[in-house]
Amino acid sequence: MAKRGGYPGGMMPGNMNNLMKQAQKMQRQMEETQAELEEKEYEASSGGGVVKVKINGQKVITELTIAEEVVDPDDIEMLQDLIMAAVNEAIRIQADDEKAQLGKITGGMGGGLGGLF
């Protein structure tokens, strides 16, 4: 015998409203956290500190320092490798921080309820 009345899936209107409010709160928190992350600065180095790079939360290089002793015109490849290593490490540090901060909000749901945010 078919049931009459009720709501599909057993969800009551009040529960749906609460769920929507929670989703909106999570979205606001994610937007605020993202804005805070964009203001942060991340630093990494390579070669024992002979190459240092700073990036902001938008992954834009804001500072690059190269020690004089590492500049060898006969070994440009080494300098290029040191720069790439420092830049990639700074980007990794930023991405790890972003993942950790947003994970606090989403509870490990992968950055936002299946891509809704």
Image (cartoon, grey):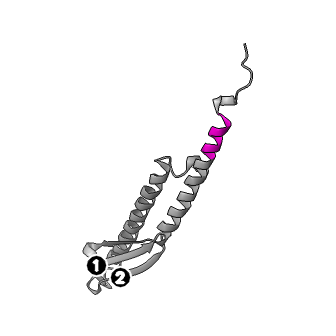
Most foreground residue, 114 or 25: 25
In this rendering, the answer to whether 47 lies above or below 111 is below
Q: Earlier in the sequence, mark 2 or mark 1?
A: 1
Q: Where residue 74 is drawn, which disc sits there?
A: none
Most foreground residue, 11 or 59: 11
Percent position of residue 47, x then y: 27, 73
Does residue 43 belong to the magenta stretch? no
Residue drawn at the location 29% of the way across and 87% of the way down: 68
Residue drawn at the location 48% of the way across and 56% of the way down: 102
User: Which portion, as a residue range, is magenta?
Assistant: 12-20
Q: Answer yes or no: do the residues labelled 2 and 1 have beta carbons within 8 Å?
A: no
Q: Which amino acid, mark 1? A: Val
Most foreground residue, 46 or 29: 29
Q: Which amino acid, mark 2? A: Thr
Pointer 1 residue: 50
The quadrant in which residue 15 appears is top right
Percent position of residue 21, x then y: 61, 49
- Name the residue at the top extreme: 1
In this rendering, the answer to whether 54 lies above or below 33 is below
Position of 100 compared to 17: left or right?
A: left
Q: Main secondary structure of the magenta part?
A: helix
Pointer 2 residue: 65
